[in-house]
Image (cartoon, rainbow, N blue to C red):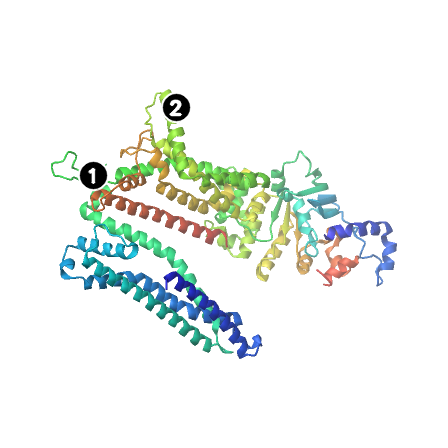
Amino acid sequence: MQPTTLLLVLIVMAFIAYQMGFRRSLAVVSGKAKQLHSLPLYHGFFVALAAFIPAFLVFSLWQILENTVITNMVLNALPDEISSKAQGDVNLFVSQIKNLVDNGITADGISPQLQQAANYYAALQSESAAWLSRTTIALSLAGLFIAWRSVKREARTRNWVEKAVIGFLIACSSIAILTTLGIVLSVLFESVRFFGQVPFSDFMFGTEWSPQTALRADQVGSSGSFGAIPLFAGTLLISFIAMVVAIPVGLMSAIYLSEYASLKVRSMVKPLLEILAGIPTVVYGFFAALTVAPLIRGFGSAIGLDVASESALAAGLVMGIMIIPFISSLSDDVINAVPQSMRDGAYALGATKSETVRKVVFPAALPGVIGGILLGVSRAIGETMIVVMAAGLAANLTLNPLEAVTTVTVQIVTLLTGDQEFDSAKTLAAFALGLLLFVTTLILNVIALYVVRKYREEILV
Amino acid sequence: MLMNDMTPDNSLARESGVTASAAASTGPMRISREHHETVGDYTVADPRITCRNVDVYYGDKRAIHAVNLDIGRNEVVAMIGPSGCGKSTFLRCLNRMNDTIESCRVTGEIELDGQDIYDKKIDVVPLRSQVGMVFQKPNPFPKSIYENVAWGPRIHGLAQNKADLNEIVETSLQKAGLWSEVKDRLEKPGTGLSGGQQQRLCIARTIAVSPEVILMDEPCSALDPIATAKIEDLIDELRQQYSIAIVTHSMQQAARVSQRTAYFHMGDLIEVGETATIFTNPVHPLTEDYITGRFG
């Protein structure tokens, strides 16, 4: 039986099990559902789960392990003359076997050994499939039967079903956590390999970034250097420019929207502002590269300044515009959460609207606003597309916003696009940069969450 | 909804007056329950605030109907009545706090010391510094205790220098009976005080801008009996200097702190008079129903 068919069969059996459990629960109390500890529904689910879950677990495990086990068995059965070959050749042979079995074609003719191995492989596969069907269906039937027998008047099936639901919820939430963990670990392992080739201190404190490794000792430009400081300086410079744009504009519009705008204006302007957040960053990117950067360059030359055509200023300005809705939307929510009684208290003392906003409402909202700003900062640091298109590639260590700089994210993109060998320091540097970036934004996020939580404790009691 | 139902009945009752009510009434009372014109003398000899024909609308809905009431010098006027009767709405008219509600509209005349406060020329900012307000739930600002009190005088420029300001803060806290409890922790946040202390801090904050009238909207409803007793004593002392209008749900409180009492019912001011008279010998059957606990 095909695995998909088998899965369908298991699901159908679960449905049948549900019906059986449901009916039996009613039968044991002769239709008086009130006498049952749990509703018939729960008895139905209980039997269905008993029929499905163990069988499904075995099914999944089998699918995961099947390939490895069969391949190993085929390998062990191979004649010595093949299995003693180099690892690469053995792998090639195995994939030839699989090709022959799955598609009936090979690259260079069919040797008797290959044919024999392929036959063995196919036989193992069909046997495995048969055993899989037998095992899972038997397991399903057994679960169904045992659970069905245990349906009694006082059986606490509701509690069991609720436990199963909680287990399911836990499994769902652990997917997110495990994925994060997986990403961190994969980046971490590659970074460790990188730090095996380049000392940690050179990476953290080096001021020159020129990611290249020599193929030959006497090669021109063989000396690579992996100092991350210029990249982080560029990232921070651009993020700083972005926040200089985004914080005042975002905050002011939040204050206008939450305190001054009438309900009608607010209901129109707020969604419009949030459209900004919906523009893809790649669109911002070419807006920065094709519109803003030439504009700044033209303006700069008009007043006698030398502006690079890919300046930090252009990328930073556009990134700031991108972040405005983040800050305005979060701040607006926080300012709205300041209780009306605060405002009433201030008005009742004869405070004007602006005094109330500046001296009472805004200070009360400040911790939450700071949380929003920090989230915006971590967004700016991690932003890639705008800087790839508008910030340039030259790793200049400079604070002049009119020069071209590069950022951590741009370098990661450059290092990993195209065909790469994954064991050179050049490629591995991307992972080290990624790890550092991850740690930076993680710290910022932790601070932001901490600040926001503190705000909740203090104000919203 | 109640307001709309009431209007036609109202006009009928008004025309037929006392005679019709005698037939409708079951007991020996002479005034009908349908009679919604104010009973009792709403004027005082030396008024601080005079209200004539005050109507308040929320959108199309009329929340207050033709209220006439004076608030005299150095007296406490209590406003009682069942929930939703409009007493808080009326109170908020007296310092134009209703301006902050977009749909709210006030008609009629409200004068503070002979000056119409709804006049176009009147600025609400100085008005509210003359008519202070204490709210139902203590609402100290998220600032230090000192700053909570000092903020009002500061925005109104009442203190020439730091010493003046300290003086104002100290006297206000003393008048509010809070000084001895907080003088060692003036820099601590006002939100860290207990509920009763917070409410007294709010009273101190109100006093600090030297108002003439203090409005109190159920100032003790969120407090325990001991804190309530302290605030009630405080109200009695404050009467020496200020005029006070207090909305309360507790009839005992009204009886304890006020000199005059006004009973509101469904947007109408039903009866007003000396507190002692209202609670011992009410004229209007609705007032009697309320103070004897038949509804409300």
- Seen at 27% across and 37% down, the residue is A230
Determine whether the residue tagged by mark 1 lies in a helix, strand or loop.
Answer: loop
Determine whether the residue tagged by mark 2 lies in a helix, strand or loop.
Answer: helix
The residue nearer to you, when weighing B97 against B189, is B97
- Name the amino acid type tagged 1: Gln
Question: Left or right of B206: which side holds A5?
Answer: left
Query: Which residue does the numbered mark 1 point to in the structure image?
Result: A212
Please state the chain letter of the residue tagged with numbered disc 2 in the rendered image: A
The residue nearer to you, when weighing A356 against A425, is A425
Q: Provide residue A162's location: percent of width, then percent of height.
A: 46, 67
Compare marks 2 and 1 and give the one earlier in the sequence: 1
Q: Point out which mark residue B279 bears.
A: none
Mark in front: 2 vs 1: 1
Instruction: Answer above or below: position of B279 versus A20.
Output: above
Question: Left or right of A279: which side holds A67?
Answer: left
Query: Which residue does the numbered mark 2 point to in the structure image?
Result: A299
How many angstroms separate mark 2 from mark 1 (CA)?
Answer: 37 Å
Q: Provide residue A121's location: percent of width, then percent of height.
A: 25, 62
Q: In which quarter of the image is the N terminus of chain A?
A: bottom left
Residue A370 appears in the picture as rendered = yes
- Name the amino acid type tagged 2: Phe
